Image: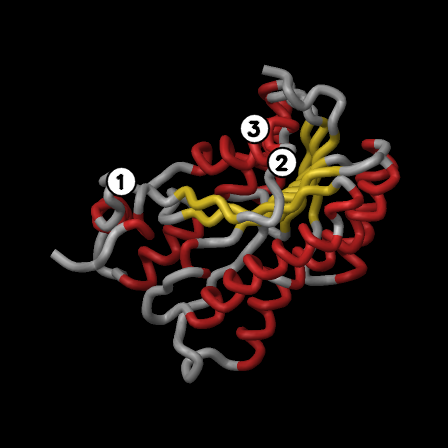
Amino acid sequence: MQEFQGKTALITGTTGIGRAIALRLAASGAHAMACGIDLAANQELNAEAERRGLPLRAEAADVSDPQSVQSFIDLAVRELGGIDILVNAAAIQPFGSVLETDPTTWNRCMSVNVGGIYLMARGVIPEMKKRGGGKIVNLASVQGYACQVGVAAYATSKGAVLSLTRALALDHARDHITVNSISPGSIRSPMLASSAQHFSPGASQEEVFARFGAMHPIGRIGTPEEVAELAAFLASDHAGFCTGSDFVVDGGLLAALGVS
């Protein structure tokens, strides 16, 4: 399918879900540019795009840094000619309660997970308005609704993403810009691997992933590609009447009561 033919897209995050979304959009015709601070991941994504002949390039940028974000957006506008789609997937997940999380770690989490969306939207929306509208998709999390023990900063940041998504949607509806978010459950990704290592350091990754999957009614963890399909829908014209909403892709996790 080439539903994004003639469209341009920016994606933050070049690992896990961000990587899958960038590849999905480019495979469907979008001229895409992704950014991340993981230089090895950027190189790997560029190699994959080249191998598949996709119109996708990854660049180094820190979404928590205003100058870095603006430089990335300026580069994208020069090379792509404008911006139609923005997907904010870059995020970090520190562990700990409030008492265990130092102020530097707390602020870094907010700067990346929430501030990154603010900075990207602030820079991209004027460019979208020049083209008569656009689509913004933010990656939130089920942790924004109900969280586990020991992820105070991350859960707080994802709750903020839900609110920021609604605010952006309302403020820019008349600009023909739709803004929605996605709340994934456990998804096979470097972030989930880090969580598995943190909470179960003595167990194999696949053992922990199986345990995580068993908590989801569907009986398994999800894949980045499954999240990417939802992101592609929200970035497409098929979702023209969707804005200010969160779409959960969690294998039924939030539908279940934790009782038996």
Give the percent coordinates (x, y) of residue 47. Answer: 60, 29
Give the percent coordinates (x, y) of residue 169. Answer: 67, 50
Q: Is residue 86 visible?
A: yes
Which mark is nearer the camera, 3 or 2?
A: 2
In the rendered image, the quadrant that contains the N terminus is: top right
User: Do the residues bearing badges 3 and 2 touch, measured as CB atoms within 8 Å?
Assistant: no
Give the percent coordinates (x, y) of residue 242. Answer: 60, 39
User: Do the residues bearing badges 3 and 1 touch, measured as CB atoms within 8 Å?
Assistant: no
Nearer-N-terminus badge (3/2): 3
Q: Is residue 162 above or below residue 173?
A: below
Q: Given the current orientation, which residue lies at the most extreme bottom position?
A: 99
Q: Which residue is mark 3?
A: 24
Q: Is residue 122 left or right of residue 220?
A: right
Say what secondary structure mark 2 lies in: loop
Q: Residue at x 61, y 21 (%)?
A: 28
Q: Residue at x 47, y 61 (%)?
A: 93
Mark 2–mark 1 distance (CA, rounded to whole Å):
31 Å
In the rendered image, the quadrant that contains the C terminus is: bottom left
What's the residue type where badge 1 is placed?
Answer: Arg
Q: Which residue is mark 2?
A: 241
Q: Residue at x 63, y 59 (%)?
A: 164
Q: Given the current orientation, which residue lies at the most extreme left position?
A: 260
Mark 3–mark 2 distance (CA, rounded to whole Å):
22 Å
